[in-house]
Structures are given as structure tokens and as C-alpha cells.
Image (tube, rainbow, N blue to C red):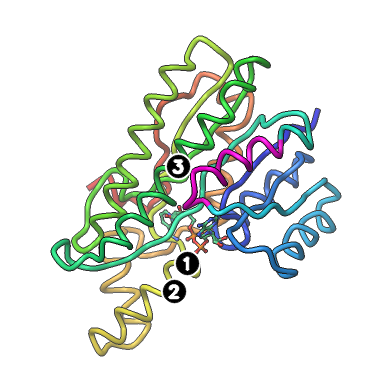
Amino acid sequence: MPKVAIVTGSTSGIGLAIAEALAGLGHIVIVNSFSDTAADHAVAKAIADGTGAKVVYRQADMSKAEDCRALVAWTEKEFGSVDILVNNAGIQYVAPVEEFPIEQWNRIIAINLSSAFHTTAAALPGMKARDWGRIVNIASAHGLRASPNKSAYVAAKHGVVGLTKTVALESARSNITCNAVCPGFVLTPLVEKQIDDRAKELGLDRETVIRDVILEKQPSKKFASVGEIAAATLYLVSDGAASVTGTTISVDGGWTAQ
Ligand code: NAD
């Protein structure tokens, strides 16, 4: 039986790979971002064409509580349920804490942390009523470790891990699980921007920045791939992971082993 899955922030990077992987299993997938352009709808259409699954695009701005909750309500109305919820939308901003712009702090906390609270709160009643659900939060190695100049991101991702554990405990007596995937560095537009910024700031070439700056903490010295993050997500939504709840899976080339 196909399940109904929402993947927030899924027009690019990790979210896109997860949406493709879920559609590849025949699930109905809601692709999401904050804009509502022809290109956004084309992303969903390309996944549908490639997999034969029902894939639709739905605009909702994950910085807004009402949009987060409306995305879940719309999906339940349109497709009857939200069985799989992947909270993936996320942004980054880098600055020392005393210079961190208040609006960037608020935006990161809203998109990277509060959106998962809102979508989860909205989806849980239906999951509980049907006694089945899978919630996967895309946290980060920064949900388990800190780095300088990423106060909002690190705080939000640690918060996501805490939210994950709490939701798991609250739903432990049902067939609902809630887990977090903690990627190390993955080469997506979010990281491309950090490479460009650090190369400019340090006056180094791209290869040096990748090896010595970006992948400094990743012992494998390789980016994780979006497909690897999708594979961890597919495991967590599978029947085989029914007893896996309230935990984190690191896909980080050994970063958090240190
Ligand atoms: P990305 O920039 O490639 O994709 C982010 C997606 O979120 C895009 O589809 C974007 O449109 C969407 N988005 C941004 N703001 C939004 C909003 N307000 N409402 C709805 N959608 C919004 O980034 P990515 O690297 O694929 O990151 C995805 C997730 O993985 C994020 O939560 C990120 O923190 C996490 N992560 C990424 C890495 C990495 O190295 N790339 C590492 C650890 C964790």
C-alpha cells in the first residue's frame, strides 16, 4: 500500500533525494518549498515522470507556523493521511554570536527547528488515529557537536534532536516512530555557499577550502552523498525499523566518533 509522505524543503539537495527515494518506492510524495514557481512544480513532475508515483508540489513557508500546519492539513484533506513526515527544510548563516543578526537567528530557529514542531504537532493526531506513522527529522552532525560561528544552526539542530526524543517517548506505545538523521557535510547548494564564502574570506582555492576547512572535521575527507542520507531515511521509514525510535543515525564519515 502506498503511504502519503511530506518532505519539507524538497526542491533541492537532501530533501529532493529523499522525495525521489520515497517516490521510488511508490509512495505519494508532497514536494515542498517556500516559493510557488513553475520550476518548483517541474521538480515534482520530474520525480513523478521518473518513478511513476504520484508526486505533487505544495508551497508552504516553513518559517511560518500557520504554513507548516496548513501543509499537513492540506495533505490530509487531499490524500487522506500523512503517514511519513520528513522535516528537512533548513538554512544556514555563519557569524560570531555577538555579531549574529537577530533576524537570521529567528529565521534559522523558525525554519530549522520550529517548523518540525508545527508539522509534527499537526500530523501526530492523524498518525495516532491510524496507529502508524514515521517522522524523520533531518538534523545534522551539528545536532550532536558544535562548531564556532554557527550558534543558531547548532542550537536549532540540538533542539531538533531533543524534539525527536520527546516525540518518540510521547508516541512510544503506538506504531509511530520519530528519529533524526545527522548528516556530516553533503555537497548541496547549502554547502556550496559556505565553500564560496570561506574561499573568499581566506583567499584560498576551492579544493583547499574543501579539504582543509569544510571537511576538517570529517575524517573520511569525503562529502556524504544525498543518496546516503535518503538511504538512512528509507531505513527509518521501513517496517524493519519499527523498534527504532528516539534515536539519531549519523551519516558523517566518522565526524561524531571523535
Ligand atoms: P539545500 O539548500 O540544498 O535545500 C534546502 C531546501 O529547503 C530547498 O528546497 C529550499 O527551497 C528549502 N527551503 C529553504 N527555506 C525554506 C522555507 N522557509 N520553507 C520551505 N522550504 C524552504 O540544503 P540541504 O543541504 O539539502 O539541506 C537540507 C537539510 O539537511 C537542512 O535541514 C540542513 O540543515 C540539513 N543538513 C545539510 C547538510 C549538508 O552538508 N548539506 C549537513 C547536515 C544537515
Q: Which residue is mark 1?
A: 187
Vertical order, 16 against 194 (above or below): above
Q: CA distance from mark 1 to mark 3?
A: 16 Å
When asked about the image quadrant of residue 193, the answer is bottom left
Tag 2 or tag 3, which sits nearer the N-term?
Answer: 3
Foreground residue among 138 and 236: 138
> Looking at the picture, which amino acid does disc 2 mark?
Glu
Ligand 1 lies under 8 Å from the Cβ of mark 1:
yes
> Looking at the picture, which amino acid does disc 1 mark?
Leu
Tell me the SS state at disc 2.
Answer: helix
Q: Position of residue 258 (x, y in %)?
A: 22, 48
Query: What residue appears at the point 81 percent right and 27 percent down from the top-left corner?
Result: 1
Q: Which residue is mark 2?
A: 192
Q: Which residue is mark 3?
A: 181
Q: Which residues are magenta?
A: 62-75
Query: What residue appears at the point 46 percent right and 58 percent down from the top-left corner?
Result: 224
> Looking at the picture, which amino acid does disc 3 mark?
Val
Q: Are marks 1 and 2 in contact (CB under 8 Å)?
A: yes
Q: Position of residue 197 (x, y in %)?
A: 33, 80
Direction from residue 251 to residue 255 in the image, left or right: left
Foreground residue among 52 and 122: 122
Query: What residue appears at the point 28 percent right and 43 percent down from the top-left corner?
Result: 144
Give the tally of numbered discs. Answer: 3
